[in-house]
Image (cartoon, coloured by chain):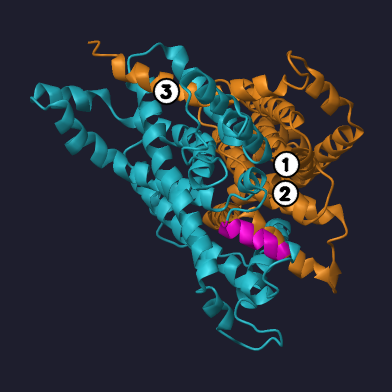
Chain colours: A orange, B cyan
Amino acid sequence: MKKQRFWPLMMILLGAFYFLIPLYATFEFSLRERRGEYSFDAYGNVLGDPQFRDSFVYSVLLALATIVVSLLLIVPTAFWVHLKLPRLRPVIEFITLLPFVVPPIVLVFGLIRIYSRPPFVLVSSPALLVAGYVVLSFPYMYRAVDTGLRAIDVRSLTEAAQSLGAGWLTILLHVIFPNLRVSLLNGAFLTFAIVLGEFTMATMLNWPTFGPYLALVGQNRAYEPAALAILSFGLTWICVGLIQLFSRGSPEQGQLAGTH
Amino acid sequence: MAEKVFEKAVTLPVPRPRTRVINLTWLGVVPFFAFSLLFLFLPSLYLVFGSFQDETGSFTLANIGDLFQPFILNSYWLSIQVSGVTAIGGVIFGFGLAYASIRGGLPRWIRGALMTFSGVASNFAGIPLAFAFIATLGRTGFVTLLFKNVLGLSLYNGGFSLYTFWGLSLTYMYFQFPLMVLIIAPAIDGLKRQWREAAENLGATSFQYWRYIALPILSPALLGTGVLLFGNAFGAYATAFALTSGTINLVTIQIGAEIRGDVLHNPGLGYALALGMIVIMAVSISISLWLQQRTARWLQ
């Protein structure tokens, strides 16, 4: 039975307007650099700016480092808890949810205060920023890995590998990691999207990453920020698109929001 | 696990002899716990303890007391207002959109498009989002000019400003309701069509169906997500900072200023601000988790 589709349609239209108008407006704004005509000058300026390239590359490197550390911490832990210590699971779940309770601005505050004096002076090393990002990635990475582990028979796979003489490292690298490929890619791309534009921690720890660069351009230029917003939107779209592409067929991979 | 089940089924009369080997399985989780301790627990605890200490390190409640000055109270109040308004708005609008796309009898691709877009928009936040809204509703923004040139209305003379409460709330909505759409969609899928048909067969009106069946089932999910959205907005810093250049008096902005070291000149108060924030976030996340567990039993 088909009832009135009027209200649902109105709702979707309203949503579409709210979603799309800022995007269209930003795009239009980004083309206004040249007086009296539309041009891509703002994009040219941005892409030609060596600071853009440097900060972007720096953020990409930080994102990759974060992904590697996060994977190395989360995957063996989740695997081990799954296999040997199921009673610890709620504890791990609780810890990986804590980054929602301690927002980035508070976390970075604590990190700065602890690691700016002896015995551990870490504020002058990008490792502290990566550590902060790894904490931010916990909820997404753990959820992705946990979902993946639930979907495969960890015990049988491990026992089969063991009976063939594999050690723990071999099992993790050659059995568990490949079986979790989709989940790991999900977690990785989400982490990538979050770290790439992250501003709060980077600016407080004074690293020249992409987020602070965006803020700087926002203070000094008129049309370039709009161009950067469009580029960032495109990048986010690519990351989310890749997540959806990889997880096709396996519904409900948690891809929830990042840092605001 | 399998052994346990087996044991239960056969009910062996003799307990198995226990082999006492030193248990080293816990070693496997040490790296994770050590990392969490160093970079999550210690920093948080440092702020918590710091808010109860004066400069010499002895116990004091003065920092907590300092929170109750009007300037600080106002920042908490504004943060709560922005988070509250965008959470309620996000819940209503997000639910409406998700419901319309899933149960509105519209083509299937609309649902797919909405989900993809929500995934992108809920991650599109921070500085670029602020830029997008400045280009849209700033003084020379697209929509502002549209109102001026086409309708002859000046938004900014009419009292609107992107850089104050309503502008910020409108901007936050851009990541709030997509998040709602993503979280609430499974709950809407869990509403069985048969329930509605059964209600209609028994003569229920649309209002009665919502009032007595759908809303009671969905309300924990709606409330739980609402509280989550509240926390999501409450902890936000980058968007507000970029939008207002740090001039709006939110708690996160205050903490940021304290880290940069240019306003309060009182680290103890900074710690207390952070503590207040952690407390509010902890309460809202706990409520949200509790409510979501209550929803879980309806949705398989």
Judge whether residue B241 is colored magenta: no
- Do the residues under discs 1 and 2 have CB atoms within 8 angstroms? yes
Task: Kindly indicate whether the residues beneath marks 3 and 2 are on one polypeptide chain.
Answer: yes
Query: Is A143 or B260 nearer to us in this picture?
Result: B260
Confirm whether residue A245 shows in the render: yes
Residue B234 in the image: x percent, y percent? 52, 53
Q: Amino acid at mark 1?
A: Val
Labels 3, 1: one chain? yes
In the picture of the structure, the residue carrying the numbered disc 1 is A195
User: What residue is rendered at 63% in x and 20% in y?
Assistant: A245
Could you give the CA–CA distance between mark 3 and mark 2, rounded to whole angstroms? 36 Å
Residue B265 percent across, percent down from the top left: 70, 74
Amino acid under disc 3: Leu
The residue singled out by tag 3 in the image is: A14
Residue A172: assigned label: none
- Tell me the crowding category of disc 3: few under 14, some 14 to 19, or many 20 or more residues within 10 angstroms, Cα based: some
Mark in the foreground, 3 or 1:
3
A228 left or right of B234 in image: right
The residues tagged by marks 1 and 2 sit, at their Cα atoms, a distance apart of 7 Å
Q: Residue A188 at what x, y percent from top left?
A: 70, 36
User: Which quadrant of the figure has residue A215?
Assistant: top right
* Residue sitting at the far left: B203
Q: Residues within 10 Å of mark 2 (few under 14, many from 20)?
A: many
Q: What range of the chain is rendered magenta?
A: B249-259
Judged from the image, the secondary structure of the residue bearing numbered disc 3 is helix
> Which numbered disc, 3 or 2, marks the residue that appears first in the sequence?
3
**SS majority, magenta:** helix
Name the subunit of mark 1. Answer: A
Mark 2 — residue?
A133
